[in-house]
Amino acid sequence: MSSQPIITATCSAPVNIAVIKYWGKRDTKLILPTNDSLSVTLDQDHLRSVTTARADISFQKGDRLWLNGVEEEIGTEGRLRTCIEECRKVRKGMEAKDGSLAKISGLPLHICSENNFPTAAGLASSASGFAALVATLAALYGLKPTLNSSDLSKFARQGSGSACRSLFGGFVAWQSGTEASGDDSLAIEVAPREHWPTLQALICVVSDAKKGTPSTAGMQRTVATSPLLQHRIKDVVPARMEAMRKAIKDHDFDSFADLTMADSNNFHACALDTAPPIFYMNDVSRAIVQLVEEFNRASVAEGKGKRIAYTYDAGPNAVLYAEEKEMKTILAVIRHYFPNTDFDDTFNLLGAGANASHRGAQ
Ligand code: DP6
């Protein structure tokens, strides 16, 4: 029997869906983005990663990690290693300062992470996964209150850029920052979930197959080849971030919808402007765009303003944002035009009316 403490912690983190997209890195190692982004964190009940970590002297093979029951190589460098070592380093510093703290930073870790949704299907599994990893290690090592969620977001960012935003619930901005060290590239809360409790998300799983071009490779190809991306970075996103903050502050769904859809389209235009081009949306995705546009046009003509916003990440699945009171009608319309929704491979509905969560990783 060892006299060393056995320490275990479990945390979960939700998925976030960007309404102003992150697409492009200025530093691929530190994961520093080419533009600011803004997202809504979804409800933990529907899409989440749950991670357990245990530090134990008896783990003789060193640090190990299992994702959905399958062991993943942590390696000596790379994203997983970076996230683990960033957390460990802080604990080590705390132990050096305070002699009464248990010496756990040197113990090997076993980490186990599960998603309750398909991995890498354009459903932001890396975002919730790395956020849950950092939240779990922060709990294991007792890093809070030394570090706050924005500090931890810098660690999660180095796992997967979008993961930094899942450390918070509600409406979250990732400030790209200007420092080469990445010290000011972090997530901040724009507004808590309670600020706009009636906003909901509907996720239409067009396909849960693993996506063709992973975002990491895709975005760097866009950075290297797309003139449109340069226009997006300089002339489009800064003004859009401001307008989006205002739309959220004012609960202005009409503007929120305009900006969300425009930014999704601009991001996919940049993917198309990449050489060779990247196609994330498919015919079903485009049919949903047309349906939403038509629904909004009719609604505006009736003087009701826009009622649905669509957005697409690096895959064909649609995320529709709407006010809670509209969701029943929207679901009925979607089911009417895509009657084979429920168990058809081409189009399943998941997480209908998922509330954004009150908290991020917890
Ligand atoms: C389209 O965060 O998955 O979802 O930093 O390389 O891991 P890496 O990329 P990732 O990219 C997400 C791209 C996006 C837009 C967004 O979430 O902002």
Image (tube, helix red, strand yellow):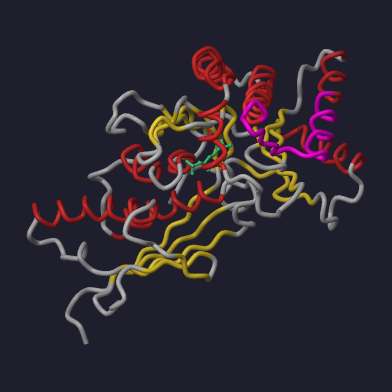
**Image height check: is 67 above or below 295?**
below
How far across and how far down the image is residue 53, in percent? 37, 65
Residue 297 shows in this picture: yes
How far across and how far down the image is residue 40, in percent? 56, 35
**Image height check: is 298 above or below 344?**
above
How far across and how far down the image is residue 277, in percent? 67, 33
Front one among 240 and 13:
240
Q: In the displayed structure, does residue 203 sit left or right of residue 232?
A: right
Q: In the displayed structure, does residue 225 sit left or right of residue 65?
A: right
Q: Which residue is drawn at 62% across and 45% down?
A: 213
Q: In the displayed structure, does residue 232 sit left or right of residue 293?
A: left
The mark total stands at 0
Kindly indicate the quadrant of the structure image that contains residue 276.
top right
Q: Residue at x 65, y 33 (%)?
A: 199
How far across and how far down the image is residue 206, in percent? 77, 46
Kindly indicate the quadrant of the structure image that contains residue 265.
top right
Residue 249 shows in this picture: no
List the single residue furthest toward the bottom.
1
Q: Which residue is drawn at 65% across and 49% down?
A: 211
Q: Residue at x 62, y 31 (%)?
A: 275
Quadrant including the N terminus? bottom left
Q: Does the magenta stretch include residue 277?
A: yes
**Image height check: is 304 above or below 151?**
above
Report the span colored magenta: 272-293
Q: Does the magenta stretch include residue 130?
A: no
Kindly indicate the quadrant of the structure image that contains residue 41.
top right
